[in-house]
Image (tube, coloured by chain):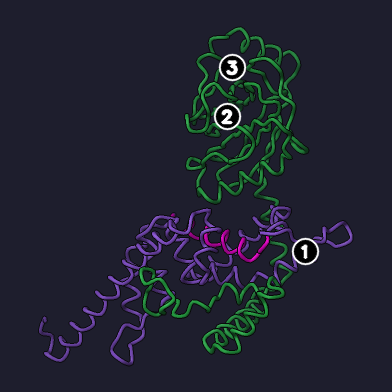
Amino acid sequence: MSMLDDALHIPGLRESPGCSTHALRRMMAGELEGEAAAQLRQHLSACSRCRSSWSALEEEQRRFASEIPFEPFAERVRGRAARARPARHVWRPALAAAAAMMLVVWAGPRLFHASETESPRNRIKGGGALQLYIGGAGATPRLARAGEPLAPGERVRVGYSSAGHRYIAVISIDEQGEVSPLYPESGVSLRSADGSGPHLMPDSLEFSGPGFERVVAIFSNAPLPIEQVAEAARREFERAGALERMAPLGIGDEESAQLLLKP
Amino acid sequence: MGPKLQVLQGGARGERDELRELYERHGAAVRARCSYLLGDRFEAEDAMHDVFARAWRSLAEFRREASPSTWLMRIATHHCLNLLRARKAQWREELEQLARIRPVGDDGRISIEGRDLVRALLGRFDEETQAAAIHYYVDEMTLEEVGALLGRSIPTVRKRLAEFAKVAREELGQLSRRDAAAASGEAGRGRER
């Protein structure tokens, strides 16, 4: 008790700083080795509270094994893991349609100057920036606004200005925290196009599933494994708890993000 | 977090074995966290499967974790707190309910189990404080561990926990006073104190 910070003390909780259910769980899961394991064993031999916690964990383990059989568990986990993967596909436009979209986009240079990303904190002024264009479903391609709702059948084309950064990687993340590597789908960041841009990525994307989707571009001067970017995105999503509260991923040299609302 | 030797699994070891390892090592802990937060057994099992599905989808990331237990407890806690937020309306009644069902203390003092008190108070706090309180008071992680897990500095974690502890002590005090009032009310045949 005296070792515990008084400001944090609640009667009946954490009476002894040496006791830790978490440490016991880690030991039970085989995660503690060497010195840490030896220390905990020593503590266990001297602490009746932790010995009874240990027995409670063993009992919990027995109950779990008898109440949740492995086979149905495995089946449900696999089934859900597969289902939760968004049925997302890349729309490959017919050549003529692609050309038409390009034409309209490129015929409207003012669009680019009016470009804006979601929020200034995600973008350093004058630096690399993401631009999303919405097209398809008979609509005139337009620059997406932050959080813009997509109509059914509309597709998204990813554009960017690299502002001198040599590499770009683009991922998207949905409301469940599911991350999809977009450019590239695997491997390391793509070499960005020279010139001020904006440059368009090949193909347009159709995002499926409900809710918002956050598209994040990471600019860097050295190539980054896309899986590393995806992992940073998952981490930040977990931390923030929601797409709209996500901060920059803190990876690469610069980043830019935008939300879209899926149909 | 130093480098950790890991055997990278090739095709020889099947998916089944990997899943079985997750199940055997972490199943009970994840279920316990879901039950603790959600209460309802079926809801808890549902959430548990979701948490493992999440781990299964991110297996590469999961394998790189220095402590898979810590990772899973973080994900499970986060997932359940999100589910709880979706049924926010019930938060208010938690403490009332707890006060009704708690066992009678043998020394006339509050005998709410600490974990239950933490659970009942969660609704008063933002998500970060909720997670900090669960990992600190229920998991009994150190301040350093909670800080690392939440990506926050130790002073920040300490501040959140101090706020939590303050409210908890106030609630305990109120419950004690109510007990005293009830006891004297009984003695005086329903007379209000």
From the top left corner, tell me how far across and down residue B120 is, in percent. 38, 69
Please provide the residue range marked out in magenta. B66-85
Examine the rendered structure and indicate whether residue A254 appears above or below residue B31: above
Q: Nearer the viewer, mark 3 or mark 1?
A: 1
- Quadrant assignment, res A93: top right
Q: Residue B59: which disc?
A: none
Pointer 1: residues within 10 angstroms few (<14), some, or many (20+)? some
Pointer 2: residues within 10 angstroms few (<14), some, or many (20+)? few
Residue under pointer 2: A152
Amino acid beneath label 1: Glu
Residue under pointer 1: B18
Residue under pointer 3: A141
Q: Nearer the viewer, mark 2 or mark 1?
A: 1
Q: CA distance from mark 2 to mark 1?
A: 40 Å
Is residue A95 or residue B19 the one in the foreground? B19
Q: Is residue B77 magenta?
A: yes
Main structural element of the magenta stretch: helix, strand or loop?
helix
Which residue is painted at 51% across and 42% down in the image?
Answer: A246
Examine the rendered structure and indicate whether residue A169 appears above or below residue B160: above
Pointer 3: residues within 10 angstroms few (<14), some, or many (20+)? many
Which chain does the green colour mark? A
- Whether tag 2 and tag 1 are in contact, CB under 8 A, the answer is no
Which residue is painted at 66% across and 64% down in the image?
Answer: B67
